[in-house]
């Protein structure tokens, strides 16, 4: 024992000498380093600590076993660290403040490296289209653009093309009204419900009218019917003639005749407000025809870009909500053995309110669908989907969570809890154990991680602290981003086929 004590003391002296002499000549630093190395490992005999238990960050070699270049799923670090397709189909959430680099570290690298699949990509600034559409086209992808802020440079989209049942009529009406109602107080529900029923009734009648009048089954004509609501003779005749069945006629009569005029006016005002942009002649051009064939997305390599400037997302949210709702319904209807995987990269997701999205997230893996949700804060998820819906999405619907630098306090506090705690056990000289718990990483430090760092949690694995890479710093990516992109669609105005009314009842 005396020898060991001597070694420890010599080690302490040696360490001090090294600290001093290294700043001088360094002559004796070599011999003393030996005693430092020998005595250091012995210190546990006198000041014993057990190895910390609980949460920890994965080591580099452990990360390499999870994020492999040979994997075919999502690219996590922006360079070569990939998860498997199977884990990708369990979806991902990326939380990053504006300017944190999620576009250049996650979105672009994934678009440029994924192949033999189809994409839908939210592109708020048109930057993704400009930098990746050329490479995608070169690799054989068919390119489509939905650009509601500039309908003449967009493929056309008619949501009523995919509404042929009573349930689908209701869903379209609900999306139109709910998208406009975001942030309203609870007492708006009465007017919203009346507006939904009114729009649903007119969609149903227009569906039957369109069977014998080509090119009339579109949203601009629903708006036209709303505008004629108080032309009682005309509208009573139209509904009586084209309602799918008597139940619709009775509902219409109850809605219009069974209420006082002020109430009906409230329903109508809410419905017209929900569809006000449809009345714009330019927007009407977007809806009068349809260029999208969702059924081919699993058969042919396709990339769809939804270009909506960030400051214009709110007024066009109903377009995005309708499009995504119908798109996911289509690609998740069935899966053949040879169907292509489908990747959805949804930037600015905090502005959307897609119907039944909780179910979409929890069932995506069954259909080889991978959804990446990109948010600025977890608060946005709770705002649109409520506490229950947000917990379903975050819990059962997402396997991979990526947090970039610049987290707000709410997000950092959530990540602090997700990372877990470290249990440190210390023995006293009397042999007693003292246990203390501390966070693996505190919220204040999480808010200050380096610009190129990200916290990544995937599946049931321990967390990773990753170094991420910018697409512009990698020569191959830069070369591929320079491939000229196809021109945006250029559309000529179409003549809008309108409803022709007959005021005489039959």
Image: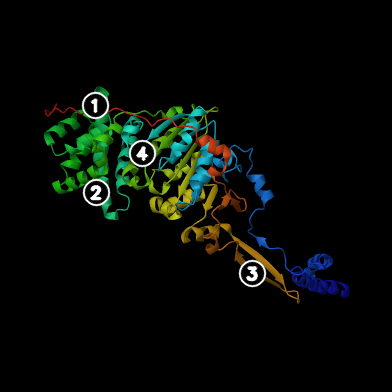
Q: Quadrant of the N terminus?
A: bottom right
Disc 3, SS? strand
State the separation of the CA atoms marked 3 and 1. Answer: 74 Å
The residue beneath circle 3 is 436
Depth check, front residue: 46 or 270: 46
Image spot of residue 465 (x, y percent)? 60, 54
Q: Where does label 2 land, which residue? A: 191
Q: In the image, what residue occupies the spot 87% across and 75% down?
A: 2
**Left or right, 416 with reference to 37:** left
Mark before the other along the chain sequence, 3 or 1: 3
Sequence-first disc among 4 and 3: 4
Label 1, secondary structure: give it: loop
Left/right placement of residue 200 relative to residue 98 reads left
Q: Which residue is mark 4?
A: 322
Residue 290 shows in this picture? yes
Displayed quadrant of residue 433: bottom right
**Taking 139 as reference, is 36 left or right?**
right
| Pick the front one: 300 or 260 | 300
Instruction: Name which residue lies at 32% across and 53% down.
Output: 183
The Cα–Cα distance between marks 4 and 1, rounded to whole angstroms, is: 24 Å
User: Looking at the image, is mark 4 or mark 1 nearer the viewer?
Assistant: 1
> Who's the residue at 27% across and 47% down the image?
192
Name the secondary structure under disc 4: helix
The residue under the point 60% across, 66% down is: 438
Q: Is residue 276 above or below residue 133?
A: below
Question: Which callout, 1 or 2, points at the residue further toward the start of the chain?
Answer: 2
Rendered image: mark on residue 495: 1
Residue at the outermost front position: 25
């Amino acid at each position: 024992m005396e020898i060991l004590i001597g070694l420890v003391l010599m080690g302490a002296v040696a360490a001090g000498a090294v600290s001093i002499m290294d700043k001088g000549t360094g002559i004796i630093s070599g011999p003393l380093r030996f005693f430092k190395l020998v005595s250091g490992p012995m210190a546990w005999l006198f000041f014993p600590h057990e190895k910390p238990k609980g949460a920890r960050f994965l080591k580099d070699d452990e990360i390499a076993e999870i994020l492999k270049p040979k994997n075919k799923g999502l690219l996590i670090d922006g360079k070569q660290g990939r998860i498997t397709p199977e884990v990708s189909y369990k979806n991902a959430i990326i939380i990053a403040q504006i300017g944190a680099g999620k576009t250049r570290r996650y979105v672009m690298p994934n678009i440029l490296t994924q192949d033999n699949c189809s994409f839908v990509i939210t592109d708020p600034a048109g930057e993704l289209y400009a930098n990746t559409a050329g490479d995608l086209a070169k690799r054989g992808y068919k390119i489509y653009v939905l650009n509601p802020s500039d309908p003449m440079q967009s493929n056309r989209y008619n949501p009523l093309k995919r509404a042929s049942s009573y349930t689908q009529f209701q869903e379209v009406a609900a999306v139109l009204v709910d998208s406009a109602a975001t942030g309203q107080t609870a007492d708006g529900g009465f007017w919203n419900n009346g507006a939904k029923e009114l729009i649903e009734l007119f969609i149903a009648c227009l569906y039957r009218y369109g069977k014998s009048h080509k090119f009339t089954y579109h949203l601009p004509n629903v708006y036209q019917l709303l505008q004629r609501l108080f032309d009682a003779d005309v509208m009573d005749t139209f509904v009586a003639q084209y309602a799918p069945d008597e139940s619709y006629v009775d509902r219409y009569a109850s809605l219009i005749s069974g209420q006082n005029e002020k109430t009906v006016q409230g329903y109508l005002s809410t419905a017209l407000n929900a569809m006000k942009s449809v009345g714009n002649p330019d927007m009407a051009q977007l809806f009068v025809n349809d260029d999208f064939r969702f059924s081919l997305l699993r058969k042919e390599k396709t990339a769809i870009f939804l270009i909506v400037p960030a400051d214009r997302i709110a007024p066009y949210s109903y377009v995005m909500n309708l499009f995504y709702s119908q798109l996911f319904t289509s690609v998740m209807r069935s899966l053949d053995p040879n169907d292509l995987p489908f990747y959805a990269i949804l930037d600015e997701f905090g502005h959307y309110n897609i119907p039944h999205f909780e179910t979409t997230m929890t069932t995506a893996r069954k259909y080889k669908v991978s959804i990446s949700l990109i948010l600025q804060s977890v608060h946005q998820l709770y705002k649109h989907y409520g506490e229950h819906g947000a917990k379903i999405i975050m819990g059962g619907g997402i396997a991979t969570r990526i947090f970039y630098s610049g987290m707000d306090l709410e997000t950092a506090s959530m990540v602090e809890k997700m990372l877990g705690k470290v249990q440190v056990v210390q023995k006293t000289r009397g042999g007693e154990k003292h246990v203390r718990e501390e966070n693996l990483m505190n919220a204040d430090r999480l808010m200050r991680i380096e610009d190129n760092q990200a916290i990544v949690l995937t599946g049931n694995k321990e967390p990773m602290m990753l170094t991420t890479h910018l697409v512009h710093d990698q020569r191959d990516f830069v070369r591929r981003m320079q491939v000229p992109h196809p021109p945006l669609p250029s559309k000529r105005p179409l003549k809008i086929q309108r409803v022709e009314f007959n005021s005489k009842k039959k």
